Amino acid sequence: MKNKDMEIILLIDQITRIALLVNGATDHNVFFQYSGHVNQLSVQVHENGWVENKRYSKGFDVDLNSINANGLLIEVKTYLTDLYMAEVQNILMEGAK
């Protein structure tokens, strides 16, 4: 296995874990799917929750074979981390009152 492949696997693992944190600890909903037949990761974020017949707020489709896959995965990870950390900050602020 190449180093690039391992980096991609680790980033997908981190994205999955953060998506689960966002789903469990915030009002946001994250949908993610890995399509092995085309080696693609799709992530859709419904900020403030999923609503029937409403398009997601932010979406990412990452071709994991592309030369910039790592950069795109880091973008997804950063976006989801920011969503989660905003909720953590809100909780901390509420507790400080």
Image (spheres, rainbow, N blue to C red):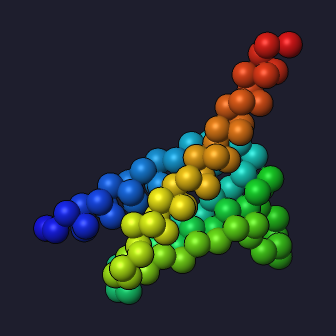
> At x 74% / y 26%, what residue is drawn?
91
On the question of residue 36 being in view, the answer is yes
On the question of residue 34 being in view, the answer is no
> At x 48% / y 76%, what residue is drawn?
62
| The quadrant where residue 50 appears | bottom right
> At x 64% / y 71%, what residue is drawn?
59
Q: Is residue 88 left or right of residue 43?
A: right
Compared with residue 82, is residue 45 higher up or lower down, i.e. above or below?
below
Q: Give the tally of numbered discs.
A: 0
Q: Is residue 66 left or right of residue 94?
A: left
Q: In this view of the protein, which residue sits in the foreground, 9 or 34?
A: 9
Residue 69 location (% of width, % of height)? 41, 73
Residue 27 location (% of width, % of height)? 75, 46
Compared with residue 67, is residue 77 higher up or lower down, i.e. above or below?
above
The quadrant in which the N terminus is found is bottom left
> At x 86% / y 13%, what residue is drawn?
97
Q: Is residue 30 left or right of residue 33?
A: right
Q: In this view of the protein, which residue sits in the foreground, 81 or 19?
A: 81
Residue 17 location (% of width, % of height)? 47, 48
Compared with residue 15, is residue 33 higher up or lower down, i.e. above or below?
below
Considering every residue shown, the one lying at the far right of the view is: 97
Residue 3 location (% of width, % of height)? 19, 63
| The quadrant where residue 4 appears | bottom left
Considering every residue shown, the one lying at the far bottom of the view is: 38
Considering every residue shown, the one lying at the far left of the view is: 1
